[in-house]
Image (cartoon, coloured by chain):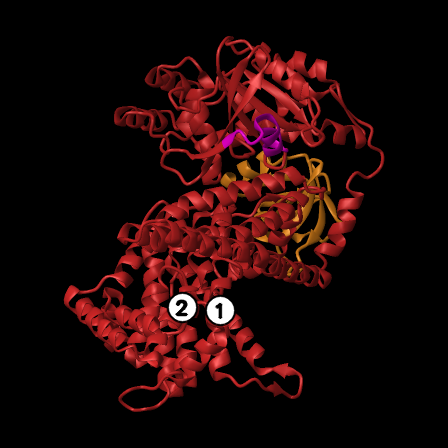
């Protein structure tokens, strides 16, 4: 075979397929999308001997070609459709040598699709350690294909694998193994004619599942359905019979090939760990301790890089203002685009750290145990054990957490998880909470050892988690399930994490976030900048005239605060300010005035904007200390009543609003990306904002 | 629970306790059985209950040389004999 070839990696979950992919392609990979579906397509390039290049697609892990989740469906889609851009010239089936029989089930299905195939026996070093001896030559002879023993973890066998790929012929050589002649033979013959193929297994597969594939004409779909009806095609029965036939075939293939001399119990260490880690008492305690450590690390480790990013962007903005010609274009570029970009990049440290931990927990096999322990609790609230990870991650940031919900197979469980994850108080709410709490809650100790302000802060977190659980419980009854939710899952043996995989995950997730969410964030930042900068020209001219007059008088007291006052007045008369006045009647029942209204509007971009907007509105220098903002806010009076604006009722109402409202366009963008529709982000925006309004209204009216 | 002609006791996998072993005989749900068989739970295969999750469900079993977990409702479609 000459020139460039396409290769697909296929295998069960937990076989080290991704590790092999990373080894073969290095950083030379990109994430794309399979058309029409949410699942990411991992594509990379690899040099083969003889100066040839291979395009490698990493297909989602699956146990069989009969898919159970969205991810798994892609495997059939790519293999069955020779016009699919990812349709491979060669399939590399990755099999775990320590559990060969179950792994080869998928191999027999793939082999019967008639594509040239190479079998990579991964973890052969592990198998040897466990006393499993595999006669590779005999296996290769019986299957009729090249079998390459490798160990992706210790990077051995790669050259052999590349050589084998190079030696693979265009014509499939695999032995016809499983006896499929008894599987609805008449229906298969009829389907072969409709589909114009001579591959009987392909015809059988498509009789089972042609509906989700968009590669056939309407007539073909109709005739396939017709064939099924005429020949009494019983899908589940045939699948069961096929699986049994395949295992029977594998029994003969593997007899005399595998010798298991592992007299010692192989799983002793793993079982010992499980006895502690999933223990009735210690299990949850250890889990909570690990969570605490992760949560703590996300905060403490990201402070420094986040500060650096912030300084870098402040410096960039200042430098730009000094060296670029003054003008609107410069302002738009620096205060709109660069500021928006800063708002995206600032999240990278938290995203990278969260995904590093998630990837470590997954790689070691601990995550499967967490899922195992939490499934029953989560199911009560319409989610599954696999929802735990995104919910916890949302304490730091909902964006990466929503991305991590992708491995939840059941569509309903996944949607509910995505819909409630942003209710869990993220780190962006923290500055809002701390500012408002310090304003209205006295710095007192309760019974001498409980900090009252800290207690209030913790209360906000508890409220947010309860709200998420409550909404999930309601959605459980409102959203219809598309498929039966099941929980049949492998519990992999505990292993050391593969650090390169951890690094790849951090890199890949951060990159996806910056490019996908970044586009939307920058667009909205520009809109907000325009709203806050521009206003009706007659009002702005009047302000300019007024301050020109003051400046002319050279009143030293007034001049010192001139720029700040002017900026504040301009903001009040900008479109954002006008909008604040417009929404004031709607938010007055919550205890908010128009100034808070502006903050609510600017906070739609990101909640952190609250503190900055408050600072601008209350005419405080941007780099002024929080204490000054606080004092100004404390001193703020309602012009009509003369009473303080920030009473306990207002502050608490405002905190509830920030706790529940969807004021994060990164989240909106990522929910759109993950659900591939505007329906879910819109529902989320509406229900969260509605909930925020009602909660604030009740709180303010009761407390005032 | 019933006793067949070979005097083996047939029951559901969900009725066993941790540490108990049995042999898979059949399934009562065809659709679920396909998934289970793909994962190595074949008739004739020996299973051992490893442990229950802290709240009693799901359960972890040892089958076909590896560890699998499933909910009790899913285990109840697996007929076993001891």
Sequence-first tag of 1 and 2: 1
Q: Residue A50's spot in the image, x, y percent? A: 57, 10
Main SS category, magenta section: helix
> Left or right: A7 with respect to A266?
left
Element type where label 1 sits in the image: helix
Residue under the point 66% across and 14% down: A140
Which numbered dot is residue A464? none
Which numbered dot is residue A610? 2
Q: For the residues marked 1 and 2, what is the alpha-carbon distance in whole angstroms? A: 9 Å
Element type where label 2 sits in the image: helix
Residue under the point 48% across and 74% down: A626
Q: Residue A536's spot in the image, x, y percent? A: 17, 65
Q: Residue A210's spot in the image, x, y percent? A: 37, 29
Q: Nearer the viewer, residue A563 or A510?
A: A563
Q: Quadrant of residue A474?
A: bottom left
Residue under the point 71% across and 36% down: B65
Q: Quadrant of residue A130?
A: top right
Q: Residue A596's spot in the image, x, y percent? A: 34, 74
Range covered by the magenta-colored residues = A16-29
Residue A95 seen in the figure: yes
Residue under the point 27% across and 53% down: A328
As for residue A437 lying within the magenta part, the answer is: no
> Residues at badges 1 and 2 in contact (C-beta under 8 Å)?
yes
Residue A543, above or below A355 = below
Q: Colour of chain A?
A: red
Answer few, some or many: residues within 10 Å of disc 1's Cα (few below 14, many 20 plus, some between 14 and 19). Answer: some
Q: Nearer the viewer, residue A325 or A527?
A: A325
Q: Colour of chain B?
A: orange
Q: Which residue is mark 1?
A: A431
């Amino acid at each position: 075979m000459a020139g460039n070839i396409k290769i697909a990696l296929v295998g069960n979950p937990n076989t080290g397929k991704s590790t092999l992919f990373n080894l073969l392609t290095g950083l030379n990979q990109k994430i794309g999308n399979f058309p029409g579906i949410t699942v990411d397509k991992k594509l990379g390039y690899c040099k083969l001997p003889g100066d040839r290049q291979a395009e490698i697609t990493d297909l989602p892990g699956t146990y069989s070609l009969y898919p159970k989740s969205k991810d798994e469906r892609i495997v059939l889609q790519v293999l069955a459709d020779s016009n699919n851009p990812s349709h491979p010239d060669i399939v590399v089936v990755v099999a775990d040598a320590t559990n060969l029989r179950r792994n080869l089930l998928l191999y027999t299905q793939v082999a019967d699709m008639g594509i040239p195939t190479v079998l990579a026996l991964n973890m052969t070093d592990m198998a040897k350690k466990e006393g499993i001896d595999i006669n590779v030559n005999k296996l290769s002879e019986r299957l009729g294909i090249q079998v390459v023993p490798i160990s992706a973890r210790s990077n051995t066998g790669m050259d052999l694998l590349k050589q084998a790929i190079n030696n693979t012929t265009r014509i499939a050589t695999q032995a016809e193994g499983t006896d499929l002649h008894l599987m609805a033979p008449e229906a298969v013959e009829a389907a072969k004619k409709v589909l114009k193929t001579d591959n009987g297994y392909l015809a059988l597969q498509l009789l089972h599942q042609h509906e989700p594939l968009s590669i056939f004409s309407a007539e073909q779909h109709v005739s396939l359905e017709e064939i099924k009806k005429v020949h009494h095609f019983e899908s589940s029965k045939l699948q069961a019979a096929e699986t049994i036939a395949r295992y029977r075939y594998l029994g003969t293939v593997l007899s005399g090939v595998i010798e298991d001399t592992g007299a010692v119990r192989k799983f002793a260490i793993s079982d010992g760990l499980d006895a502690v880690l999933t223990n009735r008492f210690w299990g949850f305690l250890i889990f909570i301790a690990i969570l605490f450590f992760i949560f703590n690390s996300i905060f403490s480790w990201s402070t420094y890089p986040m500060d650096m990013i912030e300084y870098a962007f402040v410096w960039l903005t200042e430098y730009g203002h000094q060296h670029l010609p003054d003008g609107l274009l410069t302002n738009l570029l620096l205060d709109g685009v660069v500021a928006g970009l800063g708002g995206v990049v600032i999240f990278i440290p938290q995203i990278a750290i969260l995904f590093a931990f998630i990837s470590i927990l997954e790689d070691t096999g601990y995550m499967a145990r967490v899922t195992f322990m939490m499934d029953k609790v989560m199911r009560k609230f319409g989610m599954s054990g696999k929802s735990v990870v995104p919910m916890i991650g949302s304490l730091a940031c909902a964006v990466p957490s929503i991305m991590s919900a992708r491995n939840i197979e059941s569509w309903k469980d996944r949607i509910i998880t995505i819909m409630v994850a942003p209710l869990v108080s993220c780190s962006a709410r923290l500055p809002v909470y701390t500012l408002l709490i310090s304003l209205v809650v006295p710095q007192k100790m309760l019974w001498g050892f409980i900090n009252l302000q800290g207690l209030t802060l913790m209360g906000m977190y508890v409220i947010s988690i309860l709200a998420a659980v409550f909404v999930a419980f309601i959605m459980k009854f409102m959203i219809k399930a598309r498929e039966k939710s099941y929980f049949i899952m492998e519990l992999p043996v505990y292993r050391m994490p593969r650090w390169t995989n951890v690094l790849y995950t951090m890199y890949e997730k951060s990159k996806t976030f910056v490019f996908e969410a970044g586009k939307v964030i920058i667009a909205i930042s520009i809109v907000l900048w325009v709203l806050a900068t521009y206003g009706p020209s007659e009002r702005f001219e009047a302000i300019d005239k007024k301050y020109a007059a003051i400046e002319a008088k050279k009143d030293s007291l007034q001049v010192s605060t001139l720029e700040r006052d002017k900026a504040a007045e301009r903001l009040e008369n900008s479109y954002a300010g006008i909008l604040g006045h417009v929404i004031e009647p709607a938010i007055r029942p919550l205890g908010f005035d128009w100034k808070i209204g502006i903050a609510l509007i600017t906070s739609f971009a990101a909640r952190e904007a609250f503190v900055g907007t408050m600072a601008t509105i209350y005419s405080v220098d941007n780099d002024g200390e929080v204490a000054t903002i606080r004092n100004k806010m404390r001193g703020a009076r309602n012009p009509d009543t003369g009473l303080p604006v920030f009473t306990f009722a207002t502050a608490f109402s405002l905190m509830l609003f920030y706790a529940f409202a969807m004021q994060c366009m990164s989240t909106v963008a990522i929910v759109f990306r993950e659900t591939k529709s505007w329906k879910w982000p819109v529902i989320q925006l509406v229900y969260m904002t509605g909930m925020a309004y009602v909660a604030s209204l009740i709180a303010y009216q009761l407390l005032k | 629970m019933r006793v067949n002609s070979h005097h083996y006791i047939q029951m559901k996998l969900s009725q066993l306790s941790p540490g108990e072993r049995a042999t898979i005989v059949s399934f009562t749900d065809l659709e679920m059985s396909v998934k289970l068989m793909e994962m190595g739970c074949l008739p004739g295969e020996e299973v051992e209950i490893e442990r229950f999750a802290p709240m009693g469900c799901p359960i972890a079993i040892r089958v076909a040389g590896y560890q699998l977990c499933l909910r009790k409702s899913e285990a109840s479609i697996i007929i076993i004999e001891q």
